[in-house]
Amino acid sequence: MRQIIAIAVIFVAILGMKYTSEILGPILLSIFLAIIIYPVLMWLKKKGLSYNQSVLITLVGTLVLGAAILAFISVSLAQLVKELPNFTINSSGILAQYGNEIIKFIVTNIPIENIAGLMAIGMFLLFAVIFLVYELPLIKVRLVKGLGADSSALNKIYDIFDANIKYFIIRAKVNLLYGIGVSAILFVFDINFAVLWGLLTFALGFIPYVGIIIAAIPPVLVAWAKYGIWGAIAMGIFFIIINTIAESYIFPRLTGKGLQMSVFVVFVSLFVWGWILGPTGFLIGVPLTLIIIKYLENYDETRWLALLMGSEGEDDTKEKK
C-alpha cells in the first residue's frame, strides 16, 4: 500500500510540474543560475571584503552582465529576423533542398521573432537571480535556526547544494572556453553572428552530449549558404571534435569521475525533464537528476536505485579489463 501511495504521489507531482512548466521552468532555472553566482559572493568575502560589500559587488556585477547579455541578444535577434527572409542555400542539389527545409522548420517553429517575449523572460530571470543571490545567505541562516546546526537533514541539503555548485561551476568553465573558441573560429571564417552562436554554444553546453551538436546547426547552415556543402561538412566536423573533447576528456578530467551518472540515465533524463519542463528541462535536467540520486542515496530502501543510476560500476569494469 505504501508503494502504491508513493507511486501515486510521484505521478501527481510529475503532472503538476508538467502543467505548471511555463512558470516553474524559469523559477527553477533562476535558482540554478543563483547557485552558479553564489560562489562569487563567497570568494569576495574570502578576499577580505565585508558581507555588504561582497553582496553589493556581486549584485551590481550580475545586473550589469545580465543587462549587457540581454541587450546583445535583443539586437542580434532583431538583425537575425531581418536577414532570415533572404537566407537560403543557393543550390539545385537535393541536399540543398533539405537544408532549406531545415531553415524553414527553424523559422516557423522557434519563435525568434518574438523578441519582446524572450526579453520578458530574460528580465524575470535577471531580477529573480539578483533577489535570490541576496537571499541565499539569509536562507542558510534560517535553515540552521529551523533545523539545527547538527541536523542530518541540513547536512543532506548542503551535500545536494555542493554537488550542484561543483557541477555548474565546472560545466560553466568548460562551456565558456568552448563558447569563446567557437566565436573566434566563426569570426575568422566570417560566419554571420559569430558571437551569438558562441553564446548559444555556451548555453546549450549545459545539455551533455547533444547540446553542442544542437548549437552547431545554425553555424553549419550559415557555412552551407556561404561556402557550399563542403563548408558545412567542415563546420560540422569542427563541432563534433570540440563536443568529443569537451564531453570525453576535459569535463571528466575536471570532475574526477565525470557526471557520476550512467550515460543512459543522462540521455533519458534530458528528454524526461524536457517533456516535463519544456526547453528549461533540457538545460537543468542533469542537476535535477543529480538531486534525485543524492536523495535516493540517503535511504537504505532506495540506495540500490541510486547505485543503478550511477557510473561506479562502469569504472570497476574498466579497472578489471
Image: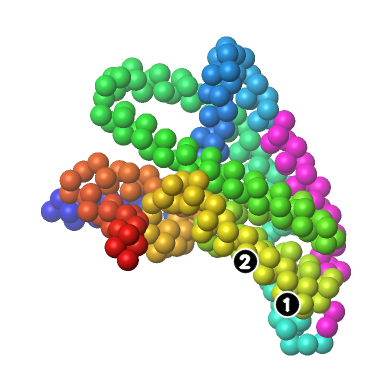
What's the residue at 75%, 47% (across, down)? 73
Which of labels 1 and 2 is toward the front?
A: 2
Judged from the image, the secondary structure of the residue bearing numbered disc 1 is helix
Q: Label 2: which residue?
A: 240
Residue 309 at least partly seen: no
What's the residue at 63%, 60% (across, down)? 242
Left or right of 311 on screen, residue 89: right
**Sequence-first tag of 1 and 2:** 1
Q: Quadrant of residue 87?
A: bottom right
Q: Per the image, is 68 magenta?
A: yes
Magenta segment's dominant SS is helix
Q: Per the image, is 321 magenta?
A: no
What's the residue at 72%, 41% (across, down)? 69
Q: How many marks?
A: 2
Left or right of 184 on screen, residue 47: left
Crowding near the residue tagged with mark 2, few <14, some 14–19, many ≥20 C-alpha atoms within 10 Å: some
Highlighted range, magenta:
64-91
What's the residue at 65%, 21% (across, down)? 57
Mark linked to residue 246: none
The image shows residue 36 at horizontal and vertical percentages of: 54, 36
Q: Amino acid at mark 1?
A: Gly
Q: Amino acid at mark 2?
A: Ile
The image shows residue 236 at horizontal and vertical percentages of: 68, 69
Residue farthest left in this picture: 1
